[in-house]
Image: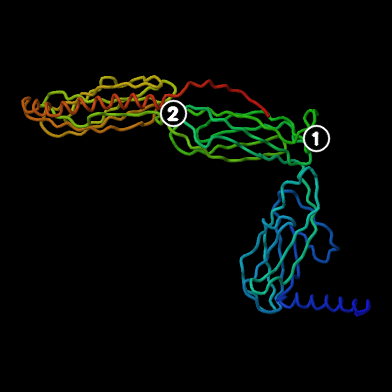
């Protein structure tokens, strides 16, 4: 049976052996450590003061006792190892001193405390030889005096020209002091539009209850009316929270469909034949599938020697309806002619329709040709009418009332 005295010796020997085994692969040691410009080794374990959300530089001076491959310096704040940072891997040679720099992110959220004690962990390790040395540095994390954060921004990632883009925004005071007279502005700089609202005074700590101005976060709503003529594309939406002492900016993106997104342009016949000097008739049907009236402009583009006329160069089409415009084309010489009709709405090209006219030398030949395609034209027109009715039924939207004004959570 082992006595208490012998058991104590056994524990001591076991501890020494464990230490030797654990350090058998110690290929080097940390000689110096600097955190945010402060020397922290051999300073009596005085905590280093840092600020919440700050990125602190950590410089590690490491001396190699022997050759080792795939070495790196790794660091993290205690409890946040999943957010650790490390240097690239490198080889070390015996008797050499190495200096490496990493940047560590200090946690931003201190719950409701104005300060908190944490530890910075710094490790020098090798892929094959394990950990050579490690240091734990005490940190005192405190809030900045004045800092606001945009916690959340909710908006539709897609919108249409002429609509109202609604933004729900939450702002929080992350500072030690009151965030007084905080305003929030939302804008799309490329379009020159913006909206602004007063979010009030934010306390450093949410005290709850019915106490006025004792909340540390507040939500509000802003509105951006998109111009009718906005070109389709992806735009940056900038959200800025600002008061006398702090500024916070967040950028979101929104894809805006142009004014012609709800419009359809249909032509039953794109090619016709006629005699020289005789008009050939075409038609374009415009369908407005939006929820408000739209004005369309038809711009002709024809080749030399061709006369093109449109019955209504500018047409207004009510929401959920369609309108057919006639186009007449003629030529004074026999030949094949190409022309186009560009349909615009609110400064944006909705669609380009291309047509062909084949003129012949006599009315007799033209009449024979026209008789051949007459039945086809009639059938095509019937098809277009049915298609327009279907599109109108499918795209018709219920009218919505828009209520503007700020609302707060």
Q: Mark 1, mark 2: which one is toward the viewer?
A: 1
Marks 1 and 2, the one that precedes in the sequence:
1
Q: Which quadrant is the N terminus positioned in?
A: bottom right
Q: Report the front residue among 70 and 11.
A: 11
Measured as percent of width and height from the top left, residue 63 is found at 72, 74
Marks 1/2: CA–CA distance: 48 Å
Task: Give residue 183's quadrant in the image.
Answer: top right
Q: Nearer the viewer, residue 236 or 165?
A: 165
User: Which residue is at a point 40% across and 29% down the rendered structure image?
Assistant: 262
Residue 387 in picture, x, y percent from top left? 31, 27
Q: Secondary structure at mark 2?
A: loop
Farthest front residue in view: 1
Which residue lies under the disc numbered 2?
A: 229
The C terminus - image quarter: top right
Residue behind mark 1: 207
- Say above or below: 57 vs 90: above
Circle 2 Cα neighbour tier, 10 Å, few/some/many (<14 / 14–19 / ≥20): some
Report whether 121 appears left or right of 303. right
> Of 246 and 1, which appears nearest the observer?
1
Residue at image point 64% right, 28% down? 197
Q: Residue 196: x percent and y percent?
A: 62, 29
The quarter holding residue 45 reads bottom right
From the top left corner, tell me how far across and down residue 390 is, in percent: 35, 26
> Quick check: 27 left or right of 299?
right
């Amino acid at each position: 049976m082992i006595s208490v005295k012998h058991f104590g010796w056994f524990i001591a020997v076991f501890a020494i052996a464990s230490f030797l085994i654990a350090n058998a692969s110690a290929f080097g040691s940390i000689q110096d450590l600097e955190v945010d410009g402060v020397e922290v080794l051999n300073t009596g374990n005085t905590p280093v003061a840092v600020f919440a959300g700050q990125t602190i530089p950590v410089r590690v001076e490491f001396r190699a006792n022997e050759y080792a491959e795939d070495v790196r310096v790794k660091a993290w704040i205690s409890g946040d190892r999943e957010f650790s940072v490390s240097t690239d891997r490198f080889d070390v040679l015996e008797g050499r001193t190495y200096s490496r720099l990493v940047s560590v992110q200090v946690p931003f959220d201190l719950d409701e405390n104005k300060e908190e004690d944490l530890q910075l962990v710094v490790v020098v390790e090798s892929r094959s030889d394990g950990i050579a040395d490690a240091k734990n540095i005490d940190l005192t994390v405190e809030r900045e005096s004045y800092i606001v954060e945009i916690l959340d921004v909710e908006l539709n990632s897609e919108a249409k020209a002429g609509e109202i883009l609604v933004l729900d925004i939450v702002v929080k005071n992350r500072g030690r002091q009151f965030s007084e007279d905080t305003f929030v502005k939302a804008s799309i700089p490329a379009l020159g539009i913006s909206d602004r609202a007063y979010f009030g005074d934010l306390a450093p700590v949410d005290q709850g209850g019915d106490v006025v101005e004792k909340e540390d976060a507040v939500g509000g709503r802003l509105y951006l009316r998109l111009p009718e003529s906005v070109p389709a594309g992806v735009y940056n939406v900038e959200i800025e929270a600002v008061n006398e002492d702090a500024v916070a900016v967040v950028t979101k993106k929104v894809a805006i469909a142009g004014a012609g997104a709800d419009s359809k342009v249909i032509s039953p016949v794109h090619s016709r034949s006629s005699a020289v000097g005789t008009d050939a008739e075409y038609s374009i049907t415009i369908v407005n599938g939006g929820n408000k009236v739209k004005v369309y402009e038809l711009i002709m583009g024809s080749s030399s020697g061709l006369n093109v006329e449109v019955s209504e160069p500018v047409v207004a089409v009510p929401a959920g309806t369609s309108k057919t415009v006639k186009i007449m084309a003629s030529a004074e010489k026999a030949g094949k002619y190409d022309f186009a009709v560009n349909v615009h709405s609110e400064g944006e090209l909705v669609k380009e329709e291309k047509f062909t006219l084949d003129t012949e030398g006599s009315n007799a030949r033209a009449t024979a040709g026209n008789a051949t395609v007459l039945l086809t034209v009639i059938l095509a027109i019937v098809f277009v009418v049915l298609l327009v009715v279907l599109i109108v039924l499918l795209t018709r939207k219920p009218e919505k009332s828009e209520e503007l004004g700020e609302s707060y959570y």
